[in-house]
C-alpha cells in the first residue's frame, strides 16, 4: 500500500487500499472475497489509479492467500 510510504504486507493492507477507493468486499466466502479483490485491483491498475508495484505486490499476496485457503480444504 505504498500510497506514499506504507508497505503492503498483508491482506488487511490490500483491504485498506481498496477501501481508499470505496471498495469493501465481504461475501462470507474467503476465496471468493480474495478473487473479487484481485478483480478490483485489476480494474484500478487498468485505470492507472494505483502504483504498478503495489498492483504486483497485492496480486502476489492474494495468490498466496488463495493457495493457502485451497490447501486447507
Image (spheres, rainbow, N blue to C red):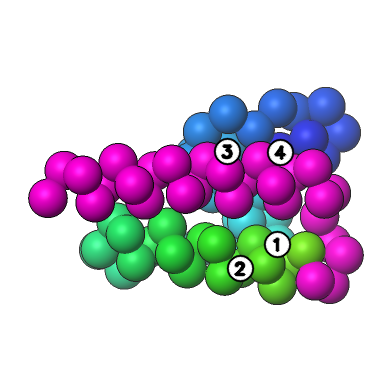
- Secondary structure beneath dot 2 equals helix
The spot of residue 43 in percent (x, y) is 70, 72
The spot of residue 59 in percent (x, y) is 59, 50
- Secondary structure beneath dot 4 equals loop
Label 3 neighbour load within 10 Å: few <14, some 14-19, many 20+: some
Whole-number angstrom distance, CA of label 4 to CA of label 1: 12 Å
**Residue carrying label 2:** 40
Q: Is residue 70 left or right of residue 65?
A: left
From the viewer's perspective, is the residue at label 1 or at label 3 nearer?
3
Please say whether residue 72 is one of the residues in the magenta stretch.
yes
State if disc 2 and disc 3 touch (CB < 8 Å). Answer: no
Considering only order in the chain, which callout, 4 or 3, is on the residue closer to the N terminus?
A: 4
Report the residue at 79% width, 42% height from top: 53
Judging depth in this view, the residue of 16 and 48 nearest the camera is 48
Whole-number angstrom distance, CA of label 2 to CA of label 1: 10 Å
Q: Main secondary structure of the magenta part?
A: helix
Considering only order in the chain, which callout, 2 or 4, is on the residue closer to the N terminus?
A: 4
State if disc 4 and disc 3 touch (CB < 8 Å). Answer: yes
State if disc 1 and disc 2 touch (CB < 8 Å). Answer: yes
The range drawn in magenta is: 46-73
Considering only order in the chain, which callout, 2 or 3, is on the residue closer to the N terminus?
A: 3
Q: Residue 13's mark?
A: 3
Q: Quadrant of residue 60?
A: top right
Whole-number angstrom distance, CA of label 1 to CA of label 3: 13 Å
**Residue carrying label 4:** 1
Q: Residue 21's mark?
A: 1
- Secondary structure beneath dot 3 equals helix
From the viewer's perspective, is the residue at label 4 or at label 1 nearer?
4
Label 4 neighbour load within 10 Å: few <14, some 14-19, many 20+: many
Amino acid at each position: 500500500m505504498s500510497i506514499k510510504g506504507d508497505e503492503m504486507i498483508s491482506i488487511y493492507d490490500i483491504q485498506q487500499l481498496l477501501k481508499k477507493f470505496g471498495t469493501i468486499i465481504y461475501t462470507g466466502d474467503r476465496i471468493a472475497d480474495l478473487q473479487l479483490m484481485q478483480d478490483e485491483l485489476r480494474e484500478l491498475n487498468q485505470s492507472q489509479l494505483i502504483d504498478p508495484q503495489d498492483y504486483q505486490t497485492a496480486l502476489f499476496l492474494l495468490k498466496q492467500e488463495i493457495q493457502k485457503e485451497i490447501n486447507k480444504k
